[in-house]
Image: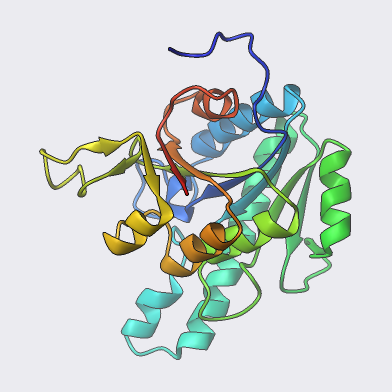
Amino acid sequence: MSAPPSSGPVYKRVLLKLSGEALMGEQQFGIDPAVTTRIARDVGDIQAMGVQTSIVIGGGNIFRGVAASVRGMDRATADYMGMLATVINGLALQDALEQQNIQTRVVTAIEMRAVAEPFIRRRAIRHMEKGRVVIFAAGTGNPYFTTDTAAALRAMEIKAEVILKGTKVDGVYTADPMLDPKATKFASISYLQVLERQLKVMDATAISLCMDNKLPIVVFNLREAGNIRRVVQGEPVGTTVGM
């Protein structure tokens, strides 16, 4: 049974994890303004419900550190470049949100005061309490850590109740549904099953962090308008990763 549209949010504070690729739309790289506008409208829906919202976004649509290191670039240097790509995405998303009249702050783990605030935990929480969307950019500020791990870390720090992981598919499957037509979707799955089966929900460090702190992850299709609101209202959208 789906929750009625008028039902209130079941989560009061959430962290939305987006891949950089989510911003590409049908392009091969870069940022599609139509996509950032649609995401901004969806975020506006839950902001209007009084949900305190934060976002962690990847940089894979611009630069992927791991891929560059495989081709011979120093891994730490490549990862720092990837972190800077997440700042570019954060600024693009901030612009889209502000065009929807949603107050937004980009908060970065690498200091660059001309374009974003430095990450200070209590200040970030205060922004959310005042109804501002907080976009966490530049990952953890450290190489060798992914934006998945950054999402898990920031979610713990701000005491988010759930990580909403927006993807191209509508949940977690037994195999890649794009490659295996027999793949079946899980309604829910445990952290240990995700780790044992090596399912590509988030990387192992992020999953372990969430497991240690009992933080649920909801994996859902970001491309379907309104899905963020449906998840926040408790409708059975996507797959829930928990204990």
Q: Viewer-proximal residue, 71 or 146? A: 146
Q: Residue at x 82, y 61 (%)?
A: 121
Q: Is residue 112 something one can see in this rendering?
A: yes
Quadrant of the rendered image containing residue 204: bottom left
Is residue 147 visible in the rendered image? The answer is: no
Front residue (pair 114, 203): 203
Residue 122, image x and y in percent?
A: 87, 58
Q: Between residues 63 and 190, which one lies in front from this camera angle?
A: 190
The total of numbered circles placed on residues is 0
Residue 203 in the figure: left or right of residue 87? left
Task: Please indicate whether residue 106 sits to the left or right of residue 202 in the image.
Answer: right
Side of 166 relative to 95 (left or right)? left
Q: Name which residue lies at 68% across and 58% down.
A: 156
Where residue 131 sits: x, y (%)?
A: 83, 35
Q: Is residue 1 above or below residue 187?
A: above
Report the front residue among 26 and 216. Answer: 216
Asked if residue 234 is positioned above or below residue 72 in the image, the reply reads above
From what the image shows, is residue 181 above or below residue 28?
Answer: above
Q: Quadrant of the N terminus?
A: top left
Looking at the image, residue 200 sits to the left or right of residue 136; the answer is left
Task: Name the spot of residue 14 as percent of width and height, x first.
Answer: 66, 41
* Percent of width and height locating residue 213: 61, 58
Which image quadrant is residue 162 in?
A: top right
